[in-house]
């Protein structure tokens, strides 16, 4: 029997405001969509935390034996500077400032995104679609919504008619916002907008002459609205009605609210059963922001090059730190918190390493089977990773007692303990044991030496752009090159 038939999962559903028993639409299958990054800058640590939460959830569903289709998109067009459908496209603006092609921006920061997530030991999603790869699907959805009288075209742009939609539906049901309050609290249009009402949002925007990113459509050469991209990609790969949609708390309104409205207007049914939202990451008790200097990039955690931390930390230590808070809780990122997590992480890894040489006995003085179920109970309670970690430390104490001769364990229970702790620490929480990583140090050294040789050849050929790229991308991966009189050496963080 598959594990999922033995474990009942309750998930906090933002749509109902309570923990609901998870029942997949198709038995044995899970369809999950998570809003991915807009790739115009280095991935934000707060976004990493959100994606880490859903990586853990993906891992748990797979562990239980579900066949999971996990879709996490890349937004590479259409995300304007603010939610009022105004300003430049964020990627186009970056391209203009750096005098490069928009797709160069996309490529650079998509690579950065994948590099950072790989260091944190994320599993890749089942599908990672891009907004620009689904322009046709978005145009077809817009046509359908217009035909149903719930969108209108003005001067080449198309807007969703929120007030018309709300006559027969409930705009605001996810975020708990009342349409009358939205109308009251929204400033009047200034006469320059094409919208009928301030609450309406863009499905398609006509591109101004200077706008680099544009595609032909029945209404104008333009680009899709940010909200529409996710509706097109999620429904294409998961169907018009799927199990789980996730993202950061900041996306609940207006992004996810608009997704619901679009989908219901298009196909007449609510698109998702369970809406999940991960909470924000702050630092030293304050909002993380580049403008105030209260900010740290993920790779700066690994190399220690930031004034907010006193040393470099392993990616698994940072991952362990983040998973010690429930995904729905605000997490305060501090150096003291990282230091404490580092001690706890190595204590856990040390205990796991001790399992290999523990002596067995004829009796066990700890109920391993009952403990195992408490770990499942924690994950089944809205993926409560802090309780899972607390349970792991309960058995760490037991392992040390066995080593000291104060407790005993049978051979069969030791095997059960080893497989269970491996499942939860590594397969589900996604931690990596440094003692196992070191086994690959020879392979790492050989790969880095090859890159050093390539860099030397590039410098000899005066290809300084390639030379700098090799150095910078190794640094991003936590490997620092040091040029000296006797050649180039490297250190890892």
Image (cartoon, rainbow, N blue to C red):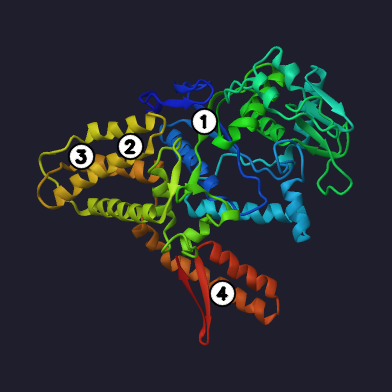
Give the structural element (helix, strand or loop) at label 3.
helix
**Residue visible at 16% across and 37% down in the picture:** 366
Give the structural element (helix, strand or loop) at label 1.
strand
Disc 1 to disc 4, how far (Cα)? 44 Å
Q: Dot 3 surroundings within 10 Å: few (below 14), some, or many (20 or more)? A: some
Give the structural element (helix, strand or loop) at label 4.
helix
Q: Give the numbered dot on residue 276.
A: 1
Disc 2 or disc 4, which is closer to the eye? 2
Disc 3 to disc 4, how far (Cα)? 48 Å
Residue under label 3: 413
Tell whether 24 sits left or right of 192: left
Contact check, label 2 and label 3, Cβ < 8 Å: no
Disc 3 or disc 1, which is closer to the eye? 1
Tell whether 403 sits left or right of 163: left
Residue under label 4: 452
Where is residue 248 drawn, in percent x and y? 55, 37
- The answer to which of marks 3 and 4 sits earlier in the sequence is 3
Disc 3 to disc 1, how far (Cα)? 37 Å
Q: Quadrant of the N terminus?
A: top left
- The answer to which of marks 2 and 3 sits earlier in the sequence is 2
- The answer to which of marks 1 and 2 sits earlier in the sequence is 1
Q: Dot 4 surroundings within 10 Å: few (below 14), some, or many (20 or more)? A: many
Instruction: Determine which quarter of the picture holds residue 219.
Output: top right
Contact check, label 1 and label 4, Cβ < 8 Å: no
Disc 2 to disc 4, how far (Cα)? 44 Å
Residue in the foreground of this view, choosing between 242 and 191 = 191
Residue in the foreground of this view, choosing between 187 and 77 = 187
Residue under label 2: 387
């Amino acid at each position: 029997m598959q594990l999922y038939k033995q474990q009942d999962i309750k998930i906090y559903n933002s749509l109902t405001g309570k923990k609901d028993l998870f029942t997949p639409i198709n038995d044995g299958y899970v369809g999950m969509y998570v809003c991915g990054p807009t790739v115009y800058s280095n991935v934000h640590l707060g976004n990493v935390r959100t994606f880490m939460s859903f990586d853990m959830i993906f891992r748990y569903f797979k562990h239980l034996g579900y066949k999971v289709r996990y879709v996490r998109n890349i937004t590479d067009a259409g995300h304007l500077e603010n939610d009022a459908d105004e300003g430049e496209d964020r990627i186009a603006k970056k391209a203009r400032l750096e005098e490069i092609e928009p797709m160069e921006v996309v490529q650079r920061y998509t690579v950065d995104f994948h590099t950072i997530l790989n260091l944190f030991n994320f599993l890749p999603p089942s599908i990672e679609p891009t907004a620009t790869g689904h322009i046709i699907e978005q145009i077809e959805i817009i046509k359908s919504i217009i035909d149903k009288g719930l969108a209108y075209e003005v001067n080449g742009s198309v807007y969703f008619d929120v007030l018309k939609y709300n006559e027969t539906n409930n705009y605001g049901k996810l975020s708990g916002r009342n349409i009358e309050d939205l109308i009251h609290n929204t400033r009047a249009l200034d006469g320059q907008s094409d919208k009928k009402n301030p609450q309406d949002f863009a499905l398609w925007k006509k591109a101004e002459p200077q706008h680099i990113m544009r595609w032909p459509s029945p209404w104008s050469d333009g680009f899709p609205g940010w909200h529409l991209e996710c509706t097109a990609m999620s429904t294409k790969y998961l169907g018009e009605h799927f199990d789980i949609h996730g993202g950061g708390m900041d996306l609940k309104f207006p992004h996810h609210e608009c997704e619901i409205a679009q989908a219901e207007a298009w196909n007449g049914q609510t698109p998702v059963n369970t809406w999940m939202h991960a909470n924000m990451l702050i630092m030293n008790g304050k909002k993380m922001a580049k403008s105030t200097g209260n900010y740290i990039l993920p790779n700066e955690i690994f190399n220690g090059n930031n004034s907010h931390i006193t040393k470099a930390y392993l990616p698994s230590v940072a991952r362990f730190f983040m998973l010690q808070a429930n995904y729905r809780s605000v997490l305060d990122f501090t150096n003291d918190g990282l230091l404490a997590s580092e001690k706890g992480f190595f204590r856990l890894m040390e205990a796991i390493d001790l399992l290999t040489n523990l002596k067995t006995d004829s009796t066990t003085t700890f109920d391993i089977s009952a403990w195992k179920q408490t770990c499942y109970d924690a994950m089944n309670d809205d993926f409560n990773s802090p309780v899972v970690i607390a349970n792991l430390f309960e058995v760490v104490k037991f392992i040390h007692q066995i080593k000291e001769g104060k407790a005993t364990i049978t051979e069969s229970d030791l095997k059960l303990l080893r497989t269970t702790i491996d499942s939860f620490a590594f397969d589900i929480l996604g931690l990596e044991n440094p003692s196992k990583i070191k086994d690959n140090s020879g392979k790492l050294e050989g790969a880095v030496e090859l890159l050093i040789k390539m860099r030397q050849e590039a410098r000899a050929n005066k290809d300084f752009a390639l030379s700098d790229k090799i150095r910078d991308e190794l640094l991003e991966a936590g490997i620092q090159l040091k040029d000296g009189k006797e050649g180039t050496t490297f250190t890892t963080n």
